[in-house]
Amino acid sequence: MDPTAPPPFLPLPPVPDARAALVRDDPAWPFRSACAAGGGIAHLRVWKAEGEGHVAIVRETGLGASTTNSAGEIWTELADCFPGPLVLFEHWPAGNCDDHDRLDQVAMEGRRPIWRRIWPTAPANPDHDLCMAWMQAYGHDLLAASNPAV
């Protein structure tokens, strides 16, 4: 890998309507993991993005391996199931490790997952304005649709 190349994050895509564009909603989605637990259960929601591709949010449930430790396997499985570009988000609801929800974009750099904080982002983050605009336009609706507690 070229150390000067930008990380392979896809742009944050528009999602036309969080309810109309939903193509999969599985509150007990089993995923494989190379971790000692062998796998886990997450809440998976997948939407058709505007144009081509899909947007997926995998919400951590605390059942089995964590979504963070299994991000590579999760990304690979979803990319195989949903054609076109895949934008994958990992959602940790408040209470698991923070006093607020957290949303990170997951991408693959070779065979290794990497993360980009989408929400909340600090004002000093170079992506702050972009992430906040996307959250206002799409992200909060997607999180509300994937988090029954909201």
Image (cartoon, grey):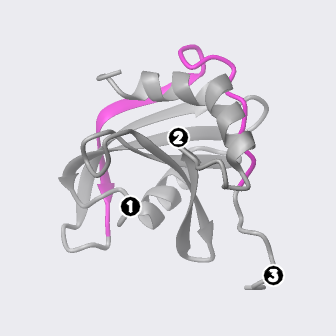
Q: Is residue 31 magenta?
A: yes
Where does label 1 land, which residue? 68
Relative side of 55 to 94, left or right: right
Quadrant location of the N terminus in the rendered image? bottom right
Instruction: List the residue tagged with mark 3.
Output: 4
Q: Is residue 145 above or below residue 120?
A: above
Q: Nearer the viewer, mark 3 or mark 1?
A: 3
- Residue at 71 percent across and 51 percent down: it is 127
Magenta segment boundaries in residue numbering: 10-33
Task: From this view, report whether residue 112 is shown above or below residue 66.
Answer: below
Look at 58% across and 30% down and name the residue there: 139
Secondary element at tag 1: loop
Q: Does 122 sit left or right of 16 as displayed?
A: left
Rounded to the nearest angstrom, the CA distance separating label 2 from label 1 is 15 Å
User: Mark 1 is on which residue type?
Assistant: Thr
Along the line of sight, the residue nearer the viewer: 135 or 75? 135
Question: Is the residue under label 1 in contact with that under label 2 (CB below 8 Å)?
Answer: no
- Whether residues under marks 3 and 2 lie with C-beta atoms below 8 angstroms apart, the answer is no
Q: Position of residue 32 (x, y in %)?
A: 32, 61
* Element assignment for label 3: loop
Q: CA distance from mark 3 to mark 1?
A: 25 Å
Give the amino acid at mark 3.
Thr
The residue wearing badge 2 is: 56
Measuring from the top left, give residue 3's x and y in whole percent: 75, 85
- Asked whether disc 3 touches disc 1, contact meaning CB atoms under 8 Å apart, the reply is no
Above or below for 55 versus 50? below
